[in-house]
Image (cartoon, rainbow, N blue to C red):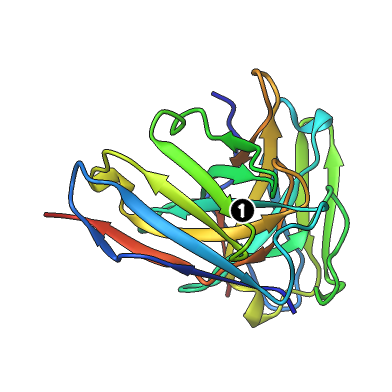
Amino acid sequence: SYELTQPPSVSVSPGQTARITCSGDALPKQYTYWYQQKPGQAPVLVIYKDSERPSGIPERFSGSSSGTTVTLTISGVQAEDEADYYCQSADSSGTYSYVVFGGGTKLTVL
Amino acid sequence: QLQLQGSGPGLVKPSETLSLTCTVSGGSISSSSYYWGWIRQPPGKGLEWIGSIYYSGITYYNPSLKSRVTISVDTSKNQFSLKLTSVTAADTAVYYCARLKGYYFGMDVWGQGTTVTVSS
């Protein structure tokens, strides 16, 4: 089955830039979405269609793609950004497309 | 403002059927622009898509769960529902309902999550 690979953890100091990657063979063919999830809360969409930011999401969140890797970048990380981050895309190799999530990355703000 | 509220039993016995309902408020489930989906998260683990449904009743399921899952919609009540049969401890999870722009696209509105434990 199709997999999206994320690093288990990323650590940065406040004010620095955090980059969280997501790798998958089909990423060049499908949009990627990013979610932020804080403990005990539902996920929140922070990036859609690779690089678009929903209203209400701070400008320090951005997304980019290059080949089979997409990246969520958080510039000027703040303590409140500490959370789990999940990428999501689609597997279109079968009869129909279906949703696939990455394993998640825990962002620690030192 | 659109809100999704999941509801259902918090405890289900092994081999029985898990049944959850998501009520949509602040908008219509019959919008032609969106799909509605279920996602789950086992304790301490990542997210898993269960399936998506359109207001017309068209459904798409995760191939790994397809044999046990049924998602249905009731437009008169602005609700959609999940049934998962023959549950085991591995089905213990927080179950989220969400709105999707397309059946395999991103989820822009989420419910608060319903915790379901499978135990005798």
- Is residue B87 left or right of A70 when viewed as pictured? left
| Residue with the mark numbered 1 | A86
The percent position of residue B69, horizontal first and vertical second, equals: 43, 38
Q: Residue furthest front?
A: B76
Classify mark 1: helix, strand or loop. Answer: strand
Q: Nearer the viewer, residue B109 or B9?
A: B9
Residue A102 shows in this picture? no
- Looking at the rendered image, the quarter that the C terminus of chain B falls into is bottom left
Chain where mark 1 sits: A
The residue at the point 22 percent across, 45 percent down is: B16
- Is residue B33 left or right of B108 when viewed as pictured? right
The percent position of residue B20, horizontal first and vertical second, equals: 42, 58
- Is residue B116 left or right of A98 when viewed as pictured? left
Residue A88 shows in this picture? yes
The percent position of residue B13, horizontal first and vertical second, equals: 18, 52
Q: Residue furthest left?
A: B120
Q: Nearer the viewer, residue A9 or A23?
A: A23
- Looking at the rendered image, the quarter that the N terminus of chain B falls into is bottom right
Label 1, residues with CA under 10 Å away: few <14, some 14-19, many ≥20: many
Q: Nearer the viewer, residue A93 or B86?
A: B86
The residue at the point 70 percent across, 42 percent down is: B103
Three-letter code, disc 1: Tyr
